[in-house]
Image (spheres, rainbow, N blue to C red):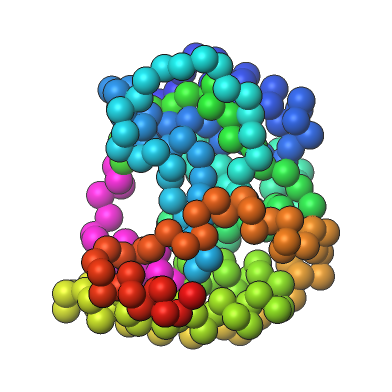
Amino acid sequence: DCRVAPSWLRVLVDAIVGGNAAAAGSRMLDWDGTRIDFDGAAMNFHGHGCNRGFGRLYVAGPPRAPEPTLFACGGAMAVERATFLDVGGFDGEYFAYFEDVDLGWRLWVEGQRVLYVPEAVAFHRHRGSGMDPVRWRELLERNALCSLYKNYDDANLAIVLPAARALMAARAAAAGAAEAAAYAAAERAFDAALPRLEAARARIQARRRRPDDEILPLFREPFRPSAGGRGYWEVQRHVV
């Protein structure tokens, strides 16, 4: 579901080498190159990553230099192999969705850098995998909880995890029956994974080389809602 411009790989590799980075991600456009699929990363405080600029018309402008980013979109990225293996690579338990968010977050925690490289261009068929929407929702919600559980420091996790679970319950309450079942399945799967996640968290935090205060600005949109509607937004305002 992805194709790349002829210069794509060279531009990414040059950015990694020249920017002393562990990983770099590209600008992603839709298959026809007319709309933006990914123009940099953002994440809200409860672990939901997003592709900035999604759906907007693409208008070519002057060249843009690489910039630090929380994560590189896994659809079109490059990563230094030894570092990728050293930090444990993608979390294989995620299966799909937010595994790139988690990897980038871990890299920053462990003292590495990740760059967004707008001049490296790829073309992507969004949701080309054709996953069932209920399964998609379950994976998104479970994996977001897993990422924040592993990667926040102790003080921030104590604040964020209860808030994240409260907001997930609010999204479930606002959803239809099928989607509400996906939220419930996600919460059960997260709880079942806690022994594994505790071990993973211990490894990551033992390797911490950068404080949360230096990572949080990379979220860019920490209070971006993960659902629509005035009712949900009011719940999020109250929780925040």
Q: Position of residue 120 (x, y in %)?
A: 54, 23
Residue plotted at (72% across, 44% down): 113
Residue 117 found in image quarter: top right
Residue plotted at (40% across, 74% down): 236
Residue 187 found in image quarter: bottom left
Q: Position of residue 121 (x, y in %)?
A: 48, 24
Residue 196 found in image quarter: bottom right
| Left or right, 111 with reference to 181 | right
User: Taken as a whole, is the magenta stretch helix, strand or loop?
Assistant: helix
Q: Is residue 103 visible?
A: no
| Start-end of magenta stretch | 127-142
Q: Position of residue 157 (x, y in %)?
A: 63, 77
Number of marks in picture = 0
Q: Position of residue 139 (x, y in %)?
A: 39, 66
Q: Quadrant of the N terminus?
A: top left
Please determine whether, in this image, residue 132 is positioned above or below residue 126: below
Determine if the magenta segment contains residue 114: no
| Left or right, 236 with reference to 145 | left
| Left or right, 115 with reference to 129 | right
Residue plotted at (70% across, 52% down): 107
